[in-house]
Image (spheres, helix red, strand yellow):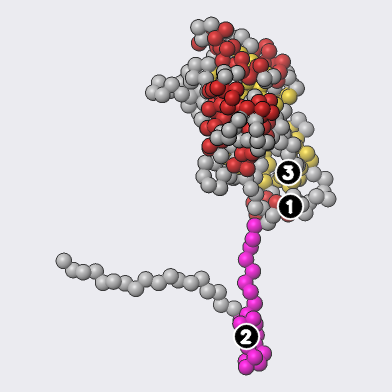
Amino acid sequence: MNKKRDKKKFKRKNIKISNVELGDVNHFTDDTIPEEKRAEKKLIEKGKISSKRNLKLKRGRILEVRSNYKCIVKIDDEKMVCTLGGRFKQVNFETKSIVAAGDYVNVDVYNDPRIEEIIARTNTLSRFSDNDFQIEIIIASNIDQVIITSSYKDPQLNLGLIDRYICAAKINNITPVICINKIDLSESLAKVKQAGSFYKELGFKVIYTSTETGEGIKELRELLKDKDSVFSGHSGAGKSSLINKLQPELKLRTAEISDYHRKGVHTTTRSRLLEWDFGGYLVDTPGIKTFGLHRKDKEKLKVIFPGLSALAKECKFDNCSHSHEIKCGVKTAVENGSYPRERYESYLRILESL
C-alpha cells in the first residue's frame, strides 16, 4: 500500500496591496500605514433616523412579514407590498426579526414602496430561543390582548403553558384572556369550569368555547370587537377553527390532530394581521409547543405569576423566591391547601428554566 505524501498545510492570508507614499525612509514607522476601515453594524438609534424623514412619508401598518425583506402593509384602505429599507439591514437589532405583524411604519410610496421608519412599539408579544443567547422572536406588536387558546381535550388542557403566556403578557402590559376550547369533548361543563376556576377567581377573563355547538362564540366576539388581539396557544387547540367560526370569510386552514401523539400539527406558518368585519384586528400566529421567557425577567416572575403576590406578604424575607426559603407564605399556602400545588409546581418549573 502506497503511503500518501504529506502536504504542507497553510492558511492563506487575505492581504490587500496598496500604494503608500513615504517620506524619509529612515523615519518610517508602522504608524505610517493607514488603518483599514471595516464596515460595522449600526446601533439601533442610528437605524431610527431616515435620510428621507423630511419627505412626505405615509403611515401604515404591517399585516404580514414575508421573505426577502418584503411586507404586506395597509396604508389607508390599500394593501401594498413594501420592501424594508436597506438601512435596517445594517442595524444591530437585538431581535431575530427586524419587523413584526402589527408594527406601525412610515413608508415612501413613490416608485417602489419602501419602509423607511418603524414607529416605536407600545408593546410586543415575544418568545425567546432556547440557546444561551436567548434571541428574542417577536410574535406580534402593538396589541391590546392575547387570547390564550387551549383545548380541553385533543390535545389535553395545558395549564402550564397558560401560566407562561399570562406571565409573558403581564410583563409586556398586554391583557391576557384565557379561552378553553373544545368543551364539547368534556363529560360536563361543570368539570371544564373547574379547570379554569383558579384563574377566574384571580380576576382573569375566562371563556369556554366550542366550534361544534357554538357555545361561547358570541361572548368571544364581543370581547374582540374594536380591539387588536392575538390568538396564540399550543398547536391543535383550535385557534383557526375559532377564527373561522367568528368570520367564515377568512377561511383559515385547519388540520386534524396527530393520531400518533394526540397533539396538534402546525397549520399557520407565519404571524399575520387580519381584519374583523365587526371591528378590530387579530394576529393569527403559528401554534407553538413551548413558550420561553427571558432570563432578565426572572426577578419579576414571583410578582406576576398568578396568585403569588398576595401570598408573598406572609414571607419572612422581602426578596423571597418562594422556592427554598424558610417561613415562606407561598409554601405555607401550598401545604395547607389554600394554593394549588399544581400551579406552584408550574411556577417552580418556569423559575428553574430561567
- Residue 234 on image: x %, y %: 53, 26
> In this rendering, does residue 99 appear at all?
yes
Cα–Cα gap, marks 2 and 1: 38 Å
Majority SS type along the magenta span: loop
> In this rendering, does residue 141 appear at all?
no
Cα–Cα gap, marks 1 and 3: 12 Å
- Residue 54 on image: x %, y %: 83, 50
Of the numbered discs in the image, which one, if any, rests on residue 29?
2
The mark nearer the N terminus, 1 or 3, is 1
**In the image, which residues are magenta?**
19-41
Determine crowd level at label 2: few under 14, some 14-19, many 20+ residues with C-alpha closer than 10 A: few
Q: Which residue is drawn at 48% across and 24% down?
A: 264
Residues 327 and 72: in front is: 327
Q: Is residue 34 magenta?
A: yes
Of the numbered discs in the image, which one, if any, rests on residue 45?
1
Position of the N terminus, as image quadrant, is bottom left
Q: In this view, does 52 lie above or below 120?
A: below
Q: Mark 3 = which residue?
A: 118
Residues 14 and 312: in front is: 312
Q: Is residue 191 above or below residue 349?
A: above
Cα–Cα gap, marks 2 and 3: 48 Å
The mark nearer the N terminus, 2 or 1, is 2
Position of the C terminus, as image quadrant, is top right
Q: Is residue 245 above or below residue 13?
A: above
Residue type at tag 1: Glu
- Residue located farthest toward the left when viewing the structure as drawn: 1
Image label count: 3
- Picture quadrant where residue 67 is located: top right
Q: What kind of element bears circle 3?
A: strand
- Circles 2 and 3, Cβ within 8 Å, touching? The answer is no
